[in-house]
Image (cartoon, rainbow, N blue to C red):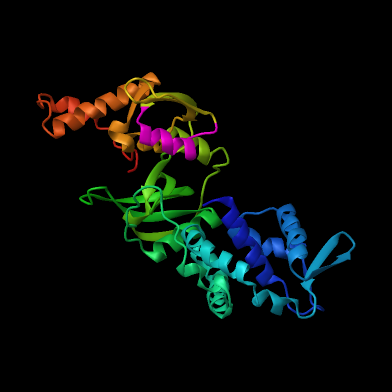
């Protein structure tokens, strides 16, 4: 989830926590204590949020020694509930993103704000009131339906992460033919497309693996605290796993006229050059792009509209896959099952 949406959720919860009575302000320290459990924010972050919110909302501050307290001016909180049309629309558009990544109890705390925004938007006159029926945000690529996932499982796992406690789970293999009883030390949650994954170590092992949440059953929060995992870096782990940015490469490829036109309008990177056409009608693309799974999948999806010339390891990978596809469709004889097996590069094979 992009940080902008988490910032949005944190600030909405902050406004909810600020007392309505001007005579009963809340200290920055107490606000921070109430927020840090769900949002992992620092006291300085809370202070910056309050300073920013005070410009848009009718907040006042009192200073007692080295401590500040915050409250709404008389009638200010009522103005918060009577959101303008743009603010109400922002709530509605943010809801599906926040629902995916916030712990369940945290989302429930701000859910009334979304319901109120929907109700408010219907009352506005003008174009804003019909905006939700006039706009759709579509994915760039095909989105799979989310797997069935128990809400209680999600809630217990997020609670384990927040409390730094271990989990006892039953975990089904990818084929669901084998179920293991595991003690997991949770390290991080990853949302990838429609699926959520738990990064954790199992039993006495120290190597992290990725566990699909929808294959976790009979989950139980234990009293055992997790061992120190301060050296764990989620971004490094994802890069090594193949899900993160592991550096840039120079992509050189011949592309069709239609793809050249598309990339001239919506470039694949800020460092992109397109030259041509050549005598065969193709264009030459040169671009600095991430050496990651998503970029390679984008190239796969172009099919005959692109022929990669560099980097060499991409050329070898694509050529191998093209040969496997040709065998699959009977274009060339399938004389080696071993070759097929070796060229099968399942993107999620490290997921247990």
Residue 141 drawn above or below residue 122: above
Front-most of residues 57 and 170 = 57
Bounds of the magenta segment? 255-270
Residue 162 drawn above or below residue 58: above
Quadrant in the picture for residue 334: top left
| Left or right of 325 in this view: 92 | right
Residue 317 drawn above or below residue 136: above
Question: Which residue is depicted at the point 9% across and 24% down?
Answer: 335
Front-most of residues 221 and 81 = 81
Percent position of residue 213, x then y? 37, 54
Front-most of residues 108 and 117 = 117
Q: Quadrant of the C terminus?
A: top left
Q: Is residue 177 visible?
A: yes
Q: Check residue 265 for magenta coloring.
A: yes
Question: Which residue is depicted at the point 74% across and 68% down?
Answer: 57
Percent position of residue 106, x then y? 55, 65
Percent position of residue 8, x then y? 61, 60
Quadrant in the picture for residue 282: top left
- Number of on-image labels: 0
| Left or right of 49 in this view: 351 | left
Q: Check residue 162 for magenta coloring.
A: no
Residue furthest to the right in view is 65
């Amino acid at each position: 989830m992009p940080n902008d949406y988490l910032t949005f959720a944190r600030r909405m919860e902050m406004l909810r926590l600020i007392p309505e009575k001007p005579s009963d302000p809340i200290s920055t320290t107490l606000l921070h204590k109430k927020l840090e459990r769900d949002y992992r924010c620092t006291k300085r972050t809370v202070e910056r949020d309050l300073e920013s919110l005070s410009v848009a909302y009718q907040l006042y501050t009192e200073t007692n020694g080295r401590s500040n307290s915050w409250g709404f001016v008389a009638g200010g909180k009522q103005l918060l509930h009577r959101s303008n049309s743009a603010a109400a629309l922002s709530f509605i558009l943010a809801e599906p993103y926040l629902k995916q990544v916030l712990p369940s109890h945290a989302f429930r705390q701000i859910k009334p704000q979304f319901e109120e925004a929907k109700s408010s938007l219907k009352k506005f006159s003008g174009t804003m009131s019909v905006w939700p029926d006039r706009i759709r945000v579509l994915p760039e690529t095909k989105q799979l339906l989310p797997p069935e996932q128990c809400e209680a499982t999600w809630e217990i796992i997020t609670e384990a992460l927040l409390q730094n406690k271990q989990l006892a789970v039953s975990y089904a293999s990818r084929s669901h033919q084998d179920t293991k009883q595991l003690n997991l030390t949770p390290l991080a949650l990853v949302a990838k497309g429609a699926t959520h994954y738990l990064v954790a170590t199992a039993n006495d092992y120290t190597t992290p693996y990725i566990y699909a949440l929808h294959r976790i059953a009979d989950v139980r929060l234990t009293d055992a605290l997790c061992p120190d995992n301060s050296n764990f870096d989620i971004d490094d782990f994802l890069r090594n796993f193949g899900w993160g940015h592991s550096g840039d490469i120079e992509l050189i490829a011949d592309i069709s006229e239609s793809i050249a036109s598309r990339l001239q309008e919506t470039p694949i990177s800020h460092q992109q050059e397109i030259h041509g056409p050549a005598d065969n009608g193709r264009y030459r693309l040169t671009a600095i792009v991430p050496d990651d799974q998503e970029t390679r999948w984008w190239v796969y999806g172009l099919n005959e509209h692109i022929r990669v010339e560099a980097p060499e390891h991409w050329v070898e990978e694509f050529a191998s896959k093209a040969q496997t596809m040709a065998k699959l469709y009977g274009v060339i004889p399938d004389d080696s099952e071993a070759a097929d097996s070796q060229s099968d590069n399942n993107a999620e094979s490290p997921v247990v």
